[in-house]
C-alpha cells in the first residue's frame, strides 16, 4: 500500500512537472517475447511501453513509466506504472531510486528499488536491485544490462536478471542486438535462456521497435532508465 501511494503521488507530480521543468527524454516501445521451444511457444507476450523524463535541474530529474502487456496462453493482460528519481553525476553516471505498481495475472504487485547506470565512451551499462511484494509474497530481483556500440547504427550487448521469491526462483540470461533504422528509431532483438523452479531451462526470443526523443545514451537516447517490475523478469509469461 505504501509503495502504491508513493507511485500515485509521483504520477501527480509528473502532471505538475511541465510547469516546473523541461522534458529531457522520452521513449515509446512495442515488443514481443516468448519461449521458443515447441511445447512452450504459446507462452508469449506483447508489450507496449512509454517513458517520460523531466529535468528539474542539471543534476536532478524525474522519470515516469507506463506499460501494458497482452499474453498468449494466459489469454489475459497486465499493466504497470512506475516513478524514478534520478541524480546525474558529472562523470556520466546516473543514480536512481524507483517505486511502482503492476497488475499481473489478477494480482497486484508493489515494487521499489535502487538503480545505477550511465554511458562511458561506446559502452552503456545499467543495473537495478528490486524488492517485490505480490499479495503478501515477498521477492527480490537483480537486473544487469550492458551494450557496446560497434558502429553508429549497430550495437550488441547482454542482459541478466534473477528473481528469488517465497514461491520459487527464476533467472534469465541473453544476448542482444540493435540496429538504428532512422535517427531516434531502432529495431531490437534478444535471444537467451530462461529457467524457473517449475520448468526446465527454455530458450526464449524477443524483438521489437523503440522510438526515443532526447537523451544522449549509446542505446539511442530516451529516458535514463528502463522500466521496472515483475513482468520484466519473465519472458512470455
Image: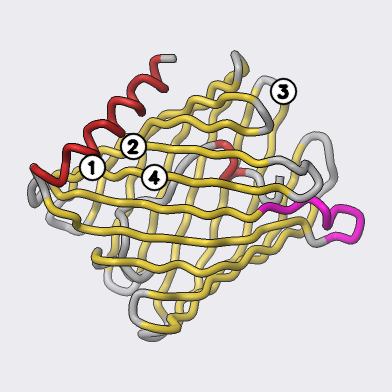
Q: Residue at x 29, y 66 (%)?
A: 213
Q: Are marks 2 and 1 in contact (CB under 8 Å)?
A: yes
Q: Quadrant of the C terminus?
A: top right
Numbered circles on residues, count? 4
Marks 3 and 2 sit apart, C-alpha to C-alpha, by 27 Å
Q: Are marks 4 and 3 in contact (CB under 8 Å)?
A: no
Marks 1 and 3 sit apart, C-alpha to C-alpha, by 33 Å
Region rendered in magenta: 37-45
Q: Are marks 1 and 4 in contact (CB under 8 Å)?
A: no
Marks 4 and 2 sit apart, C-alpha to C-alpha, by 6 Å
Residue designated by label 4:
65
Compared with 83, 48 (above or below) is: below
Q: Residue at x 39, y 37 (%)?
A: 82
Which circle's residue, 4 or 3, is located before the other in the chain?
4
* Residue 220 point in image, percent of width and height: 35, 71
Compared with 91, 73 (above or below) is: above
Q: Select label 3 or label 2 by which is in front.
A: 2
Compared with 48, 14 (above or below) is: above
| Circle on res. 177 | none
- Residue 4 falls in image quadrant: top left
Q: Are marks 4 and 2 in contact (CB under 8 Å)?
A: yes
* Residue 68 point in image, percent of width and height: 54, 46
Which circle's residue, 2 or 1, is located before the other in the chain?
1
- Image side of residue 49 versus residue 34, left or right: left
Compared with 35, 10 (above or below) is: above
Q: Select label 1 or label 3 by which is in front.
A: 1
Residue designated by label 2:
83
Residue designated by label 1:
62
Residue designated by label 3:
167
Amino acid at each position: 500500500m505504501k509503495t502504491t501511494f508513493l507511485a500515485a503521488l509521483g504520477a501527480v507530480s509528473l502532471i505538475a512537472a511541465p510547469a516546473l521543468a523541461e522534458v529531457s527524454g522520452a521513449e515509446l516501445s512495442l515488443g514481443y517475447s516468448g519461449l521458443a521451444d515447441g511445447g512452450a511457444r504459446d507462452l508469449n507476450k506483447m508489450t507496449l511501453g512509454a517513458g517520460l523524463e523531466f529535468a528539474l535541474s542539471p543534476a536532478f530529474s524525474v522519470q515516469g513509466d507506463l506499460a501494458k502487456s497482452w499474453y498468449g496462453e494466459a489469454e489475459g493482460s497486465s499493466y504497470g506504472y512506475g516513478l524514478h528519481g534520478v541524480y546525474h553525476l558529472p562523470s556520466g553516471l546516473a543514480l536512481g531510486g524507483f517505486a511502482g505498481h503492476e497488475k499481473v495475472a489478477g494480482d497486484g504487485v508493489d515494487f521499489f528499488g535502487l538503480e545505477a547506470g550511465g554511458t562511458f565512451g561506446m559502452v552503456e551499462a545499467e543495473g537495478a536491485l528490486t524488492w517485490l511484494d505480490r499479495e503478501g509474497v515477498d521477492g527480490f530481483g537483480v537486473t544487469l544490462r550492458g551494450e557496446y556500440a560497434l558502429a553508429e547504427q549497430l550495437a550488441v550487448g547482454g542482459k541478466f536478471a534473477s528473481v528469488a521469491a517465497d514461491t520459487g526462483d527464476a533467472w534469465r540470461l541473453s544476448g542482444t542486438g540493435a540496429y538504428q533504422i532512422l535517427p531516434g528509431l531502432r529495431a531490437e532483438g534478444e535471444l537467451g535462456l530462461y529457467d524457473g523452479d517449475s520448468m526446465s531451462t527454455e530458450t526464449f526470443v524477443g524483438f521489437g521497435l523503440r522510438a526515443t526523443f532526447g537523451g544522449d545514451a549509446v542505446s539511442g537516447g530516451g529516458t535514463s532508465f528502463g522500466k521496472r517490475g515483475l513482468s520484466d523478469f519473465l519472458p512470455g509469461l
